[in-house]
Image (cartoon, grey):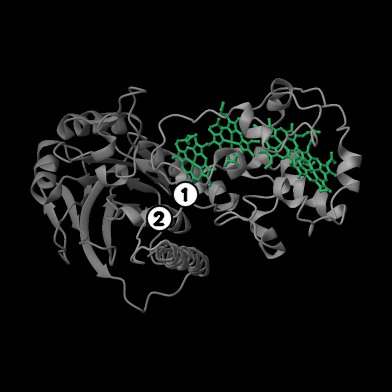
Amino acid sequence: MKAQYGQVVLVDGGGFFPELDDQQDAAWFLMDAMMILHTDAVGVSEKELRYGRAFLLAQQKRSKLPLTCANLWDKQTKKTLVAPYLLVKKGTATVGIFCVTSEKADLGVSRDSVTVEDPTAAATRTVAELRKKGATVVVLLSQLGKVESEDIVTAVDGIDAVIVGRNTPLLQKGRMIKTTVACYGGEQGQYIGRTLLTLDAKKKVATGDNETFILGPEVGENPSMLTLVKSFEDSFNDKQRKKEKERAAAAELNRANGGTGNSEQAVDHYLGGEICARCHKAEQEQWATTLHAQAWKTLVDAKKDANQDCIPCHVVGYKKPGGFQTGDDAAKLANVQCENCHGMGTQHEALPTQARRITEATCRGCHTAANSPNFNFATYLPHILHKPQGALKPLPPNPAKQKMLQGGH
Ligand code: HEC
Ligand code: HEC
Ligand code: HEC
Ligand code: HEC
């Protein structure tokens, strides 16, 4: 379509987060996929809030996906949760895009942090604001279902096109509702709708038409998308394999302890910091500048990287579940990483509401009197905090360094 038409705006109606709790990875994957397609605007409904407000906002920050919704309000900031509307310039057209979602939807875990405003009030206000800001075309991403979507474009003037979402049946040909072209795209992302709008001399919409196409095998492959799909599937398969192994190990342990051998209990374990970086990029980048990120190189340079007396404090989770077992694990688990201070990744709450405080005891496990005689929590801490600390005085040299270099077997 981009090759065929000059001024193409690509939108997604929203409601794309997965249905199941254990498919959370599909959420960030779809957001990355829509970025690869250069999607101009994406609607938000309560489905995108199913893993919590913080998860959605963190993923938006990371992926930079242009999310919009005019009637979801953040109770904390008293602003809309995401952009109330987006203005996209394409050639001679300025397209204003906004989304409204249903007041009746169950906000689940986000109900204490987000409220839903009356969609008609939000649409009336937003259309006026978009026209004032110079929008020549106005598109509504509606998460109201078929009947209410048709009602709202009848009640609110000035909406040129509506993408009808939330359990709506697929209609191959869209229809006109007063002066609005409606698109009924069906479910499961197997279809793409095309709304053609022709503009008059004043760049206002003159005529419109909609048709929906199934995405069959004749749609060519996109190399970046293939790479993304592969990396998603690899990590997904890895996780499944690991889960299988753990289930088997837990069952084995359970049998050894006289149980029935079918323990389904999840075993907590280390994951490695690469996973954390996916959602905590800023912390990861700061961590990479600290000496903790060099701790393995220190052992390699000293030719002590196979020495069991040295490894424990210079890697993640030595000889513990999921942790560093042998040199083969160095790529993933070498150095003092996130989990050395924050604990096993599998204990990460789905929706942490407040940071667990890290105390001196966390450091003292490694910064012992023998290996780190200068250690002082107050002076050492600023050197590892993730938030900028301004200019810091370098710490004095570690008097135990020579002893460590000579130590071990
Ligand atoms: C899928 C995304 C995701 C991944 C992966 C992830 N986190 Fe988080 N984490 C969050 C969100 C969302 C929050 C809460 C909001 C915030 O602080 O950004 C959070 C909060 C935290 C907090 C502060 C709250 C607390 O419990 O102390 C820490 C520390 C943290 N994460 C560490 C980690 C570590 C370590 C890893 C890797 C083992 C990790 N995270 C992996 C999403 C993620
Ligand atoms: C798993 C072990 C481990 C834990 C836990 C740990 N550290 Fe470290 N830390 C090290 C090692 C090993 C080094 C030396 C890295 C190198 O240079 O090879 C180090 C180095 C440092 C340095 C750099 C010292 C210098 O000479 O510049 C600071 C600062 C530091 N740690 C602070 C902390 C603080 C604060 C905590 C607790 C919040 C902490 N560390 C927890 C193992 C650990
Ligand atoms: C109990 C935990 C622990 C063990 C075991 C340990 N280290 Fe360390 N190592 C540390 C900590 C903590 C530091 C940072 C101390 C500081 O700067 O205050 C460190 C720092 C170092 C440094 C200095 C890095 C630099 O350039 O400043 C070297 C070299 C080193 N360790 C090598 C070794 C060797 C070799 C062994 C085995 C003989 C070993 N370590 C065993 C915790 C440990
Ligand atoms: C040496 C210990 C240490 C390491 C290693 C470490 N952190 Fe932290 N982290 C802290 C401390 C201390 C805080 C501040 C919380 C507090 O005051 O207790 C913190 C806070 C956080 C928070 C809460 C939000 C913030 O920025 O304050 C997140 C998220 C987080 N860390 C993620 C990570 C990730 C991801 C990594 C690995 C790339 C990592 N941390 C490595 C000590 C550590």
Question: Left of 235 or right of it: where is 5?
Answer: left
For residue 346, the mark is: 1
For residue 121, the mark is: none
Can residue 76 be seen by looking at this rendering?
yes
- Is the Cβ of the residue at disc 2 closer than 8 Å to that at disc 1? yes
The residue carrying pointer 1 sits among few (fewer than 14), some (14 to 19) or many (20 or more) residues within 10 Å by Cα, namely: some
Can residue 202 be seen by looking at this rendering?
no
Tell me residue 393's x, y (percent). Answer: 81, 22
Query: In the rendered structure, which amino acid carries the disc numbered 1?
Result: Thr
**Of tags 2 and 1, which is closer to the observer?**
2
Tell me residue 240's x, y (percent). Answer: 43, 66
* Beta carbon of the mark 2 residue lies under 8 A of ligand 1: no
Question: Left of 173 or right of it: where is 42?
Answer: right
Vertical relation: 396 (above or below) 143: above
Q: What's the CA distance linking mark 2 and mark 1?
A: 9 Å
The residue carrying pointer 2 sits among few (fewer than 14), some (14 to 19) or many (20 or more) residues within 10 Å by Cα, namely: few
Q: Which quarter of the rendering shows the C terminus? A: bottom right
The residue at 83%/55% (across/down) is 304
Sequence order check, earlier mark of 2 and 1 = 2
- Which SS class for mark 1? helix
The residue at 32%/30% (across/down) is 80
Tell me residue 88's x, y (percent). Answer: 40, 43
The residue at 44%/67% (across/down) is 252
Query: In the rendered structure, which amino acid carries the disc numbered 2?
Result: Ala
Give the mark count: 2
Vertical relation: 379 (above or below) 17: above
- Which SS class for mark 2? loop
Depth check: 125 or 405 in front? Answer: 405
For residue 266, the mark is: 2
